[in-house]
Image (tube, rainbow, N blue to C red):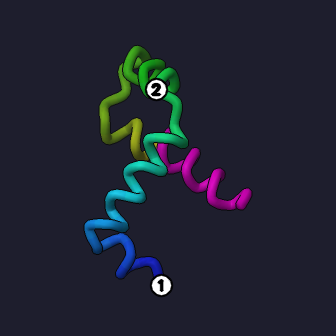
Amino acid sequence: MLLPVIISPFGNYLSRVYAAAAIPTEMLDAARVDGAGETKIFRSSATNRLLRLTERK
């Protein structure tokens, strides 16, 4: 159901804006200081936080 929205450029833009607003930069900086790479940050911190935020709504 969400696949057409994700593939479109506007859906991609909305996803990026939502993710940028939902994840504080302090959290990303703390993960980088702990030694996590971009892939690990996305896989562990960002996806967990985004999934929790979408479940609340």
In the image: residue 37, left or right of residue 25: left
Taking depth in this image into account, of 52 and 24 the one nearest to the observer is 24
> Residue flagged by tag 1: what amino acid is it?
Met
Residue holding disc 2? 25
Residue at x 35%, y 81% (from the top left corner)? 4
- Residue 26, x across and y down, in percent: 50, 21
Instruction: Name the secondary structure under disc 2.
Output: helix
Q: Is residue 31 above or below residue 43?
A: above
Mark with earlier residue (2, 1) = 1
Instruction: Name the secondary structure under disc 1.
Output: loop
- Badge 2, how many Cα within 10 Å: few under 14, some, many 20+? few
Alpha carbons under labels 2 and 1: distance apart: 30 Å
The question of residue 52 being in magenta is answered with yes
Residue at x 36%, y 67% (from the top left corner)? 11
Judged from this view, the residue extending furthest toward the front is 10
- Residue 22, x across and y down, in percent: 54, 42
Residue at x 63%, y 59% (from the top left corner)? 54
Judged from this view, the residue extending furthest toward the bottom is 1
Q: Is residue 46 above or below residue 53?
A: above
- Residue 39, x across and y down, in percent: 32, 41
Among the 4 quarters of the image, the one containing residue 34: top left
Residue at x 31%, y 35% (from the top left corner)? 38
> Residue flagged by tag 2: what amino acid is it?
Thr
Q: Which mark is residue 1?
A: 1
Residues in magenta, as a range: 45-57
